[in-house]
Amino acid sequence: MMNRNDSEQRARPVTPGTSISGIAAAVLVVLFFTPWFSACNAQVKGSDLAGGVDGGSSPWLFGIPLVGLAVIAIAVRNLNQPLANVARRARYVLILSVYPLLCIVLLYTQLRATSSEALIDLRYLIQFEFDFYGTLLATMAMMAGAVLDWAGGRGHVPETGRVATGLRRPTSPAISRAPPPAEPPRPRAWLQGQAGGFAHQALELTQDATRVGRSAGCEICLREPNAAEEHAVVRYARGRYYLQDQGSPIGTLLNGRRVDASVLQDGDLITIGRTVLRFQQR
């Protein structure tokens, strides 16, 4: 179960960086719609610096409030989100903040290109000074908040979905699909003739099913008149050998007892009529 400290680190109602970025973005929008560009236009002769507001030749200035609105939307989206998701969106805020800075640099360049007399007049305009430097400080505050969010979310795993309670949404445990265990190497086994037609012979078991019977198609062909055509089968499966009678009329004896099926152990004696075979395994 997630403890309280872990839940606070993963999801908070709002992070300090998000608060700073959102407030700074709101200030940026408000400052844009004050008449500081108009004040610039009134004082700088021959330079249309307020074109973005007055309908002149600088529509790029409208990007400033759009950036502010975008950052506000990101701040709202960050509410009750895991820190990893907040840190991921902080990169977008940093990228968006570059545009207002470029606008300020371009504006300052245009001011420097004006006459010195007009520039002296502009420096004493309280409205211009307040809004120009206010826009600069608001943009820097947005970037500072984004850096705080990015630094606070490092090392956390991103999560999907909105966390409304501040606790991590329970997830199903990952099911480990381990590969099936490798089958052990097949042990060497054979039937050693003890009596009958295979006395003193070793019949190696190399197949998964070795048939024993009177039929010529059997792997071990018995010369027993009472044996069935397919009397018994020695099978190999899951690392062990098994003896299975095939419904023969005289039956199959294992260590002197008649069996239908049984696991073979090293040294077991298999008797079919007069033929006796010893099972051996290494």
Image (cartoon, helix red, strand yellow):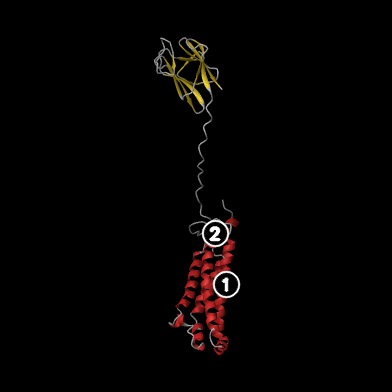
The residue depicted at 46 percent of the width and 82 percent of the height is 51
Mark 2 neighbour density, 10 Å: few (under 14) some (14–19) many (20 or more):
many
Residue 217, percent from left and from top: 40, 18
Circle 1/circle 2 CB separation < 8 Å: no
Residue 167, percent from left and from top: 54, 56
Hey, which quadrant is residue 17 in on the image?
A: bottom right
User: Would residue 251 appear left or right of 151 to someone viewing this image?
Assistant: left
Of callouts 1 and 2, the N-terminal one: 2
Work out whether 190 lies above or below 172: above
Hey, what amino acid is under mark 1? Ala
| Residue extending furthest toward the bottom | 117
Q: Please state which of residues 261 and 60 is positioned toward the viewer in this rendering.
A: 60
Hey, which quadrant is residue 4 in on the image?
A: bottom right
Residue under pointer 2: 84
Q: Please state which of residues 13 and 259 is positioned toward the viewer in this rendering.
A: 259
Residue 272, percent from left and from top: 46, 13
For residue 251, the mark is none
Q: Please state which of residues 171 and 227 is positioned toward the viewer in this rendering.
A: 227
Q: Quadrant of the C terminus?
A: top right
Residue under pointer 1: 141
